[in-house]
Image: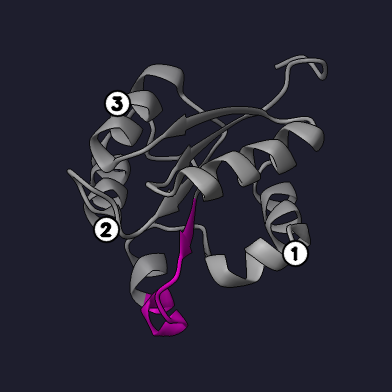
Amino acid sequence: MPESTPKIVLIVDDSKFFRTATERTLTKAGYAVITAADGEEGLRLAREKKPSLILLDMLLPKLDGPSVLHKLKADSTIKKTPVLVLTSLSQRNEEKLVSDGAAGFLEKDRLVKDSQPLLQAIAKLIP
């Protein structure tokens, strides 16, 4: 991929506020962003657009985050795409999510106040 082509990040989150704020942050940082408001749409867009990274909320309508993660990792065309889990749930779920294929875990509450941890995590996953 040429340097001038922005890396695509798919945000799958049912919170319009969070999607919009995160999209704004990532666009300013030079990423191309696509968004989905539910798990089914997120899975469809992941398969169609083949993003460089997926930001995945756990509590989603239609298809929950753990199910989306499982289906992403079972799909040979996109299973290597890193999935960064964003959730309001406590971090005790992190070990299970990572064993299910998530590349990392960030608490949404912290990201609302400071987007740096998100940008740093993305930079590590898609340099």
Q: Classify mark 2: residues with Cα within 10 Å, few (<14), some (14-19) or many (20+).
A: many
Q: Return the disc, 2 or 3, that comes first in the chain's sequence.
A: 3
Instruction: Determine whether 45 is above or below 97 in the image.
Output: above
Instruction: Determine whether 46 is above or below 57 in the image.
Output: above
Residue 66's label in the rendered image is: 2
Query: Can residue 114 be seen at all in this image of the molecule?
Result: yes
| Amino acid of disc 2 | Pro
* Left or right, residue 7 beside residue 55: right
Q: Return the disc, 2 or 1, that comes first in the chain's sequence.
A: 2
Q: Which residue is mark 1?
A: 114
Q: Residue at x 23, y 48 (%)?
A: 61
Q: Residue at x 40, y 55 (%)?
A: 57
* Left or right, residue 9 beside residue 115: left
- Magenta segment: 84-95
| Amino acid of disc 1 | Asp
Secondary structure category for the residue under label 3: helix
